[in-house]
Each structure stands twice: as structure tokens, then as C-alpha cells.
Amino acid sequence: MVLRSAARNVSRLLPGGRQLGLYMERTFTCPHCGEEISVILDLSVSRQSYVEDCEVCCRPIEIRYAAEDDALIEFSANTTQ
Ligand SMILES: [Zn+2]
């Protein structure tokens, strides 16, 4: 999956999780297991939704977000059912 490998590369560049350019790290609670996990969001895309497996319990999470003026204005992480 292209997005996932891109996110890994960005993670390596951003050990502190700070925002750089249009990428931003966002932490949230997994709706399945309740563990805190993080994703890298590309804020150059105004609206996006995709499914990512939880890195702890490996169950699918639907991530939706919206960005405006390079800032995150909406974010949600839900089960896919
Ligand atoms: Zn989980």
C-alpha cells in the first residue's frame, strides 16, 4: 500500500512527531482495542478517507479527515462496520 510506506518514511524524518510541510502526525484511540496509535496525515489533500489496520490489534479502522489551509479541521477514526 503506497500510503503506508510513505507514512513510514515520514515517521523516520519526524522523530518528535512535529509538523513539517504538509504532513502531520495525529494520535488517536483505536475504536477496537482502545490503544493509542498514530497516523501520518497528508494535509495537502483537502478531504480523505481510508482504512488502516490498527498496529496493536490489527483490526481495520476507517480514518476520515479534512484539511483547510494546511491545517487539520476534521478527524475521525471509526470501526468499518
Ligand atoms: Zn486496535
Image: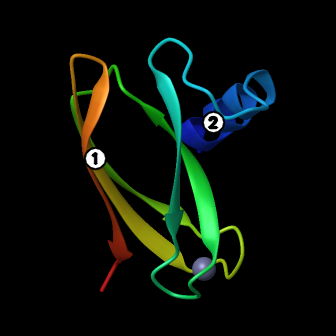
Residue 37 lies in quadrant: bottom right
In the visual, does 62 lie left or right of 68? right
Q: Secondary structure at mark 1?
A: strand
Residue 4 lies in quadrant: top right
Q: Earlier in the sequence, mark 2 or mark 1?
A: 2
> Where ligand 1 lies, by image quadrant?
bottom right
Q: Which residue is mark 2?
A: 7
Q: Nearer the viewer, residue 37 or 57?
A: 37
* In the rendered image, the vertical position of residue 70 relative to residue 11, given as above or below: above
Residue 48 lies in quadrant: top left
Q: Residues within 10 Å of mark 2 (few under 14, many from 20)?
A: some
Q: Residue at x 30, y 19 (%)?
A: 70
Q: Residue at x 34, y 74 (%)?
A: 78
* In the rendered image, the vertical position of residue 36 relative to residue 79, given as above or below: above
Q: Nearer the viewer, mark 2 or mark 1?
A: 1
Q: Which residue is mark 1?
A: 65
* In the rendered image, the vertical position of residue 62 relative to residue 30, given as above or below: above
Q: Secondary structure at mark 2?
A: helix
